[in-house]
Image (tube, grey):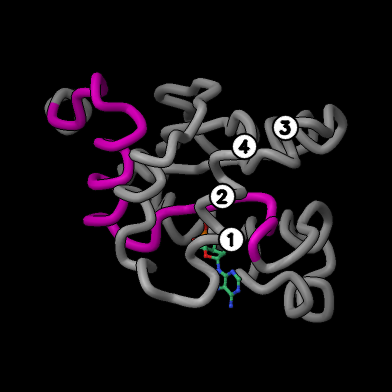
Amino acid sequence: MEITLAVIKPHVLRNTYALQQIKTLIEENFRVLDHKEVHITKELSDRFYAEHRGKFFYHRLTTFMNSGPCYALILQSEASIQKWRRLMGPTKVFRAVYTEPQCIRALYGLSDTRNACHGSDSEASALREIGILFPEFDVLAVADRE
Ligand code: CMP
């Protein structure tokens, strides 16, 4: 079974109703292997979003991610990467609102930067991102249990 990393962004953590709705959706769809509230420091966001360094939205994105606690979860299911990305919906909130009005980003996203949540885009990204936010998590132990 596949694992992925989900991150709930800071403005959603301040919205108790939104956070509860998303947690319920997650529990209905995945096994949660680990979860925690995490303050994404500048050092962590620079590593986490390294592929976006130099893009016009990089400073806005990392400053926002440093602005308050996030909630990070390691999710497991069949095809968890695709499944979580489908539940999140498109990165761009205006597109999410028009094409998938019930997805998480359409319901709780405020802008392209404050788009409610993040999900890994591949198995390699999931392992890399889990290593950054959950350095103590033993990915190999999960594989061994299968
Ligand atoms: P996330 O899943 O956290 O991964 C990269 C983030 O970059 C993405 O969600 C968006 O928040 C942000 N992003 C991507 N494209 C843009 C854009 N065109 N303008 C602003 N932010 C963007």
User: Is the shortest distance between ligand 1 and the CB of mark 1 under 8 Å?
Assistant: yes
- Ranked by sequence position, the earlier of labels 4 and 1 is 4
Q: Which residue is mark 2?
A: 63
Q: Alpha-carbon neighbours of circle 1 within 10 Å: few (<14), some, or many (≥20)? A: few
Q: Position of residue 5 (x, y in %)?
A: 42, 43
- Closer to the observer: label 3 or label 1? 1
| Nearest to N terminus: mark 2 or mark 4 | 4
Q: Is residue 3 visible?
A: yes
Q: Residue at x 75, y 33 (%)?
A: 19
Picture residue at 54% right of the left edge, 40% below the top: 66
Give me the C-alpha separation between circle 2 and circle 4: 27 Å
Among numbered discs 3 and 2, the one appearing first in the sequence: 3
Q: Is residue 104 left or right of residue 64?
A: right
The label nearer to you, 4 versus 3, is 3
| Label 1 – label 2 distance at C-alpha | 5 Å
Q: Is residue 46 above or below residue 41?
A: below
> As displayed, is residue 21 above or below residue 65?
above
What is the spatial separation of the Cα atoms under label 4 and label 3, in whole angstroms?
Answer: 15 Å
Q: Are marks 1 and 2 in contact (CB under 8 Å)?
A: yes
Q: Which residue is mark 1?
A: 60
User: Is the residue marked 2 within 8 Å of ligand 1, measured from its CB?
Assistant: no
Horizontal and vertical percent for residue 59? 51, 61
Residue beneath label 4, please? 26
Residue drawn at the location 48% of the way across and 23% of the way down: 35
Mark 3 or mark 1: which comes first in sequence? 3
The magenta segment is 113-140
What amino acid type is highlighted by mark number 4? Answer: Ile
> Circle 1 sits in a helix, a strand or a loop, which is it?
helix
141 with respect to 64 (left or right): left
- Disc 4 crowd rating (10 Å Cα; few below 14, some 14-19, many 20+) is some
Q: CA separation, marks 4 and 1?
A: 27 Å
